[in-house]
Amino acid sequence: MDKKLKNAGGKITMPEDMKERIIKACETAEKNRITRTDSDDGYTEVASGTERVSSRNRIIRTVSAAAACAVLMAGIGTTGFLLHKQNNKMAGSDIVEEINSPFGDFSTFEYRFDAGDGKYGKYSAETYSRLSDFLNKFNWGEPVEKPEGRDIDADVEETVYDIKWTKGDTPPIECNLHIANDGYVSYQESMMSFETGAMASLGDIKWYLIDFDAFDSGIQAILAQDTEKISPFGNFRVLDFELQSGIGIYNKYNSSKLYGGLADMLNNFDWGEGVYEPVSEESVLDFSDSAYTVSWELDGLISWINIESTGRTVYVDLKYDDDHLKAEELCRRIYQIDIEDFRNKFSKIVSEDEYIDQNEIDRLTRGKCKYAVIQKYGYGSLIPEDEEDKERLDDLLKNRFVHMLKVNIPSESYDSEQTLCDITFEYKIDEKNSRTMYFTVLNNGVVSMSEYTQTDDGSEPSGSATYAINIEEFKDRLADAGIDIDSFASEEAEETSENNGITFTGDMISPFDNKVIYDADGKYDPVANIKHMDQNIEKFISQFPDIRVDVCFEDENMKELVPADEQTREQIESFIRNDFESMLKYDSYSSDFNSDAEHRKFFVVYSYMSGDKEIFHKGYSVSSSNLTTRSDCLKVEGGNDEWRGPYSCTIDYNAFAAKLAEFGLI
Amino acid sequence: MLKDGCAREAVGKYGDMLYRVCLLMLRNTADAEDAVQETFIKFVTKAPDFADSEHEKAWLITVAANKCRDMLRYRTRHYTESEELLDGYAVSKEESGILEALMELPEKYRIVLELFYIDEYKAAEIAEIVGIGASAVKMRLSRGRKLLEKKYRKEYM
C-alpha cells in the first residue's frame, strides 16, 4: 500500500497552464512590491507597479462577470444597447440594474455592515443581499469638500453605520466607509506596509454628503426583516466553526445533523449582554479553565469563545500575520452564561447523534457469543453479587451494548484520556474459528474496539473501529445491573493526579504565552524567543515556594545514566545546572534534517518538582550531528500536558561527549 | 537555493510538490492553485534567508500547508470536488483509489502521510515542517495509516 501511495502521489503534477499563471502572478507581485522612500514630507508609501494580482477564483469571477455582460449585450442587441446607454436603464428589464455606488458593486465583494446594534454585522445572507441592492442604488452624490475641523478618528462617536471590506491581495487594501448621522460619509482606503506591517492610508479620505434620513430609514427597514435568530458572534449555520469540549472536537467532519444541531444551539443560546474589556499587550488568552471552546475564522480574523466552568465566557478576535506566528488581539468581550444550561443543551445534541447501522451491528455480532465480560483496571472482572443482576449484566453486554454505539466520534478522540472499563466478547464463528473483540470505553464517551480472529494458525488482528457512547446512559444501564462503575476508583487517574501535574487556578501565571519575537528584519529571533521562554518559566516557578529542579542525563533510550559515586553525581548536577545550557547556540537557524533518531545520543533533563509532583519538564535531545532540540512541557493534572517546541540549537557534540566521558558515563 | 527574481525557477523546482500537497489537502483544483500561487508570491516577495535548499523546501511546504489549513477553516464557497478530481493526471484507476482514500482522511493525517510516504520526509523533519512534536507525527502516521488502510480496503478492495 505504501508503494502504491508513493507511485500514485508522484503522478500528481501541476498542469503547465497553471504553472504559467502562477509564474505570471509571482512576477507581477514582485513588480508590485511596495518600496518605502524618504521624502521631505517624511515617509511616503510608493507603489512601484499598478497591475494587481488576483487569485484564480477572483479571475474566474471577473471573467464570468465579463462573460455575463457579453451575453447580456448580445441578447439586447444594438438597439437595446443604445437604448440602455441613452436612458441609463433599459425599460422593462429586470436584469440590468443601476449601480450608483461610487465604491463599487456591493454585491460583488464581501463586506461587514455594522449598524451599531450589537450584532457586529452578523446578518443573514438574505439581509446582505438586500443591503447590497440598497447600497448600490442609493444616491451617494458626488464627493464634497472635507467638512471643516473634522477628521476620521474624531468621528467615531458620530458614526452610525460602518462598512468595511477588502479588495485585492498581496497585501489587501482595506476599505472603510463611515456614515455619520449628520449625513457626512467618509471613505478611506489603507494598506499594510510590507516592511513595517503597519497600516498606511492610500490617498486622501473622500467625503460625501447624503440624505441621512433616507439612508437610515431604508437600512432600518431591511434590518427589521432580518428575523433569523443568530448569536452575537455571528451565524453559526454559516461559520466554519469548531467546538472543543475536553478532548472532544466537533466540526464539519461530524455528521451534518450533529454539526447543524450545535450551530442552532449556539445561535439560539442566551448569551446575555457582552461587556467590552480593553485589549492590552498582556491580555493574552488563558485557556487553562476551559470547559468549552468555540473557534472559527472569518475575514482574516480568528475568533475564539472560551467558556469557563464557572460560566464566564470570553470572546476574542485575533488577527494573525501571514505566518500565523504573531497574533494581535482586536476585540474582547466578556459574558456570563448559565453553564448548566449550556452543558445540558450541548449534551442533549451530542447524545442524539446517530447510532451505528444494522449492518455494523450484524458485523459486530456475527457468530455465537460465547461470553462477554466487563473489567475495570485494578479490579478485574466486575461481577454483581445478585443472580438477577448477573442476568441483567449478561443481557446488557450481549444484547444491548452494541446497539448503544454511535457512529460519530470526536476527531481528537484517540489521545490520552481515562479508561472507564474494558469489555471483552468472544464469538464462535464455526467449528474451528472464533473471534475476540476488545472494547475500551473511555470516560469521554469514546469506545475503541480491536478484533482478533483465532484460527488453527493462531490469533491475528482482523479489524479495529472507534465508536461513541452516551456515557451517562451506559453508566445508568450498568447501575441497573448492579454495577456502580463510578464507585471503582480509577487507579490510573489517582496515580496521575497524585504524582504529576498541577491544577490551574484563575490567577496562576502560565509559563506559556503566544508571544513570538522577531528581529529588526522581521525574522524569527531564536535567541530572544528562548530568553523570553526562560523568563516565563522563571515567573511560573516563582509561584511555587517549594520548587526544586532535578537534573540528569539519559541515554538514547531515555534511561538515566547513573554515576559511579555521590561526588560524581554532584559534579554532573553542577554541570547540568550551571554549564550545559551555555554550550548551546541559538543564533542560527538550524535545519539539519538528518537529526533523526539514529543521530540522537543523549537527553539532558530538567524536572521542576513541587513536592512530589513534577510540574514542568524541560528536555534537550543531543545528537551527534551537533543538533540539539529543546522541548518544554507543562505538566497539567489529569494528563492534559501542554508542550512547546522543539526549539533547535547546536552544540559542540565532541566537547559535550568529552564531558560525559570525564564523568565516566560513556 | 534559488535567487531573487526566480519565480519561474521556483515554480519549476517546487511547483509539482506544492501542488500535490495543496490538492490533497484541499481536494479542489482551483483552491489548490490559489494556495500554491499565494505560497510562491510570498516566496518571491518576502521569503527569509534560507540556510540551505532543504530549509527552503521545508519553508515552502510549511507556508503552503498553513495556507491550506487557513482555506479549509474559511471554506465557504468552494467545496471538495468529486471523483473527477484526479482525472487529467497520469494516475491509473487502481492508483486513484488510494489517493481518494487518503483525501478522505482528516486533514491532520493527510499532510503527515503525504509528507512521509510520498515526499519521503522523516518523522523529525515532518515535525519541523508541520510544527508539531515528533511523537505526535509518529502517532498520526500510525493512526493515519490504519485509517487509510481501513478506508482503502473498504472502498477499493
Image (tube, helix red, strand yellow):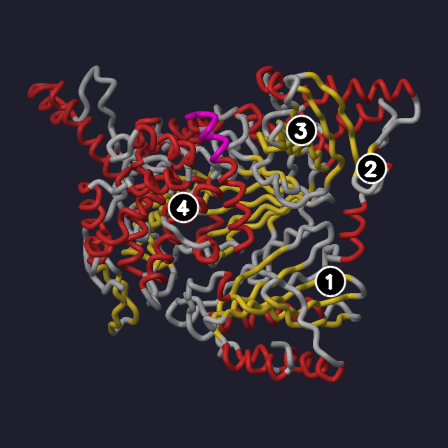
A3 left or right, relative to A118: left
Position of residue A504 measured from the top left corner of the image (x, y, whole percent): 72, 55
The residue that mark 4 highlights is B117
Mark 1 vs mark 4: same chain?
no
* Residue at the spot 43% in from the left edge and 40% down from the top edge: B72
Q: Amino acid at mark 1?
A: Glu
Secondary structure under the numbered disc 3 in the rendered image: strand
Tell me the quarter of the image containing the C terminus of chain A.
bottom right
Secondary structure under the numbered disc 4 in the rendered image: helix
Secondary structure under the numbered disc 1 in the rendered image: strand
A117 vs A159, nearest the viewer: A117
Asked whether B156 falls inside the magenta stretch, the response is yes
Chain assignment, label 3: A
A267 vs A548, nearest the viewer: A548
Cα–Cα span, label 4 and label 2 = 42 Å
* Label 1 CA crowd tier, 10 Å (few <14, some 14–19, many 20+): many
Figure quadrant of residue A406:
top right
Cα–Cα span, label 3 and label 4 = 31 Å
Q: Amino acid at mark 3?
A: Met
The residue that mark 2 highlights is A380
Chain assignment, label 4: B
What range is drawn magenta here? B148-157
Q: Amino acid at mark 4?
A: Tyr
Cα–Cα span, label 1 and label 4 = 37 Å
Q: Amino acid at mark 2?
A: Gly
Cα–Cα span, label 2 and label 3 = 17 Å
Figure quadrant of residue A231:
top right
Position of residue A400 measured from the top left corner of the image (x, y, whole percent): 73, 18
The residue that mark 1 highlights is A614
The residue that mark 3 highlights is A437
